[in-house]
Image (cartoon, rainbow, N blue to C red):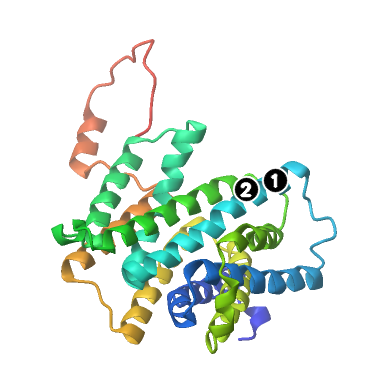
Amino acid sequence: MSTSETPPETRGALELTAAMLLSGTIGVFVVESGASPFNVVFFRCVFGTLFLGLYCLIRGFFKNHGFTPKKLGLAALGGVFIVFNWAFLFESYEKTSISVATVVYHTQPFFVVLLGALLFKDRITAHKAGWLFVAFFGLVLVSGISTSDFSSGSTYLVGVGYALLAALFYGLSTIITKRVTGVKPHLVALVQVTLGIPLLLPFTQLGQSAHFGNGWAWLVGLGFIHTGVMYVLMYSAYQKLPTTKIAVLAFVYPAAAMVCDWAVYGHHVSWVQALGIPLIVAASLGISLGWRPRLRPAAAQAAADAPAQPAAPSAERTTA
């Protein structure tokens, strides 16, 4: 079957799967570059800007771009959070492992819910609160924190904190960027990585770049592959897929990261940590897809057989 005959949803699923598989290799590229986290993010922004700028130019996205001063400001603000989100995530790789950092980082949907409630008064329903509790319990298991991690010489707890901070910053970026409507997402991403160059320059040690050696290949890969090709695949897939498939396929990313961490560095999670992964997966899908507990058949039948009661005039029906 030729590509033109492939159903759009199938193409979207293949594109998003490829994008998530690429995401799973980010940790290896970061570690193998040998650069400090802020140096990695800085050069990721540099090479990502080159790729996305050329891509947007070729595709003609700069014509009728849709930006207004307000939208441009929101995109830039989202960029502040997205580049520091990368820096904290890469710091977490060094202090924990790619596997643990990635799974903890995948608590992003819960921060979006909590931030929505805090900043925009979005209502947290009972079922969302339940999923948040499940996610928190899963997070405790996955983090694998022990009493020794609270000693003064341990950096593991700090690494878990960095991953959570990265997830928080990603949530802030998501909430802000959602309000940039009518603009190609590639242009929004271009604004964000371009802003990252002057933003991160004070934190970047350019003098170390002379000693990167083979690390340059990994840094170019992070910019061209993980900030260019990967974003193009994701944005193309999002236009073709329903929310349900996007939410499910997103978990290819942590799965791929864990496989890479094991295959390249021999790192693996313990059995206790492994128990927390399905809890986070289930809770994330529950939040993203709006899963709610259903009445048991017997309870539902009993409710159907019960005589109807007149509703109180002042009662409000709420959904849980």
Residue 161 picture location, percent across and down:
34, 55
For the residues labelled 2 and 1, the Cα–Cα distance comes to 6 Å
Q: In which quarter of the image is the N terminus?
A: bottom right
The disc placed on residue 73 is 1
Vertical position of residue 243 compared to residue 211: above or below? above
Most foreground residue, 127 or 129: 129
Left or right: 56, with 295 as reference point: right
Residue occupying the far left of the picture:
147
Label 1 is placed on what type of residue? Gly
Residue 214 picture location, percent across and down:
53, 89
Q: Residue at x 57, y 86 (%)?
A: 217
Locate residue 96: give its quadrant.
bottom left
Query: Label 1 near label 2: C-beta < 8 Å?
Result: yes
Locate residue 274: give its quadrant.
bottom left
Most foreground residue, 209 or 295: 209
Q: Which residue is drawn at 26% across and 32% down?
A: 304
Q: Which residue is drawn at 56% across and 70% down?
A: 205
Q: Name the residue under label 2.
A: 77
